[in-house]
Image (cartoon, helix red, strand yellow):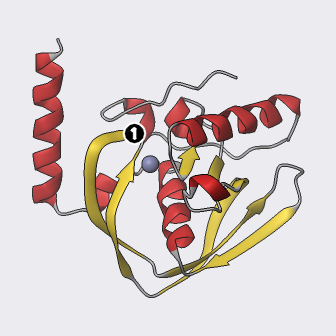
Amino acid sequence: MDKLKILTYPEPFLRQSAKDVENIDGDLQKLIDRMTFTMCESQGVGLASMQIGVDKNLIVFDRGLGDKEKREPDVLINPKIVASEGSLLSENEGCLSVPDFRADVKRYAAVAVEGVDREGKPVRIERDDFLAVILQHEIDHLRGTLFIDRISSLKRQLYKRRVKKQMRQHG
Ligand SMILES: [Zn+2]
């Protein structure tokens, strides 16, 4: 299987919103498999469709929370945060679309997320651990939001300046 190309900031597509998946067919199953493969190969704990240039409301994530020995990839179609509680600082958050940058991000401490699985069956996930952060991060992608939008403007400006400099250097 080929790894899909992951779009990186400042690619404008990452700023668009995903559209709800209307029907789950063989093509969608294949896309889910390739996204799962790409996430695992990239050592990621989550991947949203927008990151690979597809505007479908769809995320894959690792219930094993990045433990290479205990990978447990899962998918959520048309995911929505239906309840949230508290807040925490997600330390050193990173993103496959924002390479070489990490920052602390304010997130809900607990979320309830609803969607459907790859067979179209309704799913509800309630978590108050690292997976709650992963789900918030990935669902953000489906609305065109990156974690750098949720950090201080000073830190964001530093990152943007660095990317501009790199782009100049690499023509
Ligand atoms: Zn991300």
Snapshot quadrant of residue 29: top right
Q: Secondary structure at mark 1?
A: loop
Looking at the figure, which quarter contains the N terminus?
A: top right
- Can you tell which quarter of the image residue 154 is in? bottom left
Which residue occupies 10% across, 47% down? 158
**Residue under the point 66% across and 54% down:** 71
Q: Where is 158 relative to 105, above or below? A: above
Q: Nearer the viewer, residue 37 or 16?
A: 37
Mark 1 CB near ligand 1 (8 Å cut): yes
Q: Which residue appears farthest toward the top when viewing the image?
A: 171
Instruction: From this view, report whether residue 91 is shown above or below residue 86.
Output: above
Q: In the rendered image, is residue 11 in sight?
A: yes
Q: Position of residue 7 (x, y in %)?
A: 44, 30
Q: Is residue 107 left or right of residue 139?
A: left
Q: Which residue is mark 1?
A: 97
Question: Looking at the image, can residue 49 be seen?
Answer: no
Q: Is residue 32 left or right of residue 111?
A: right
Q: Nearer the viewer, residue 109 or 73?
A: 73
**Residue 2 percent coordinates (x, y):** 64, 21
List x then y, in percent, for residue 147: 35, 55
Label total for image: 1
Q: Residue at x 33, y 42 (%)?
A: 98
The image quadrant that residue 15 belongs to is top left
Q: Along the horizontal axis of the image, is 120 left or right of 59?
A: right
Q: What residue is drawn where x is 54% and y is 71%?
A: 132
Front-most of residues 79 and 126: 126
30, above or below 48, in the image = above
Amino acid under disc 1: Ser
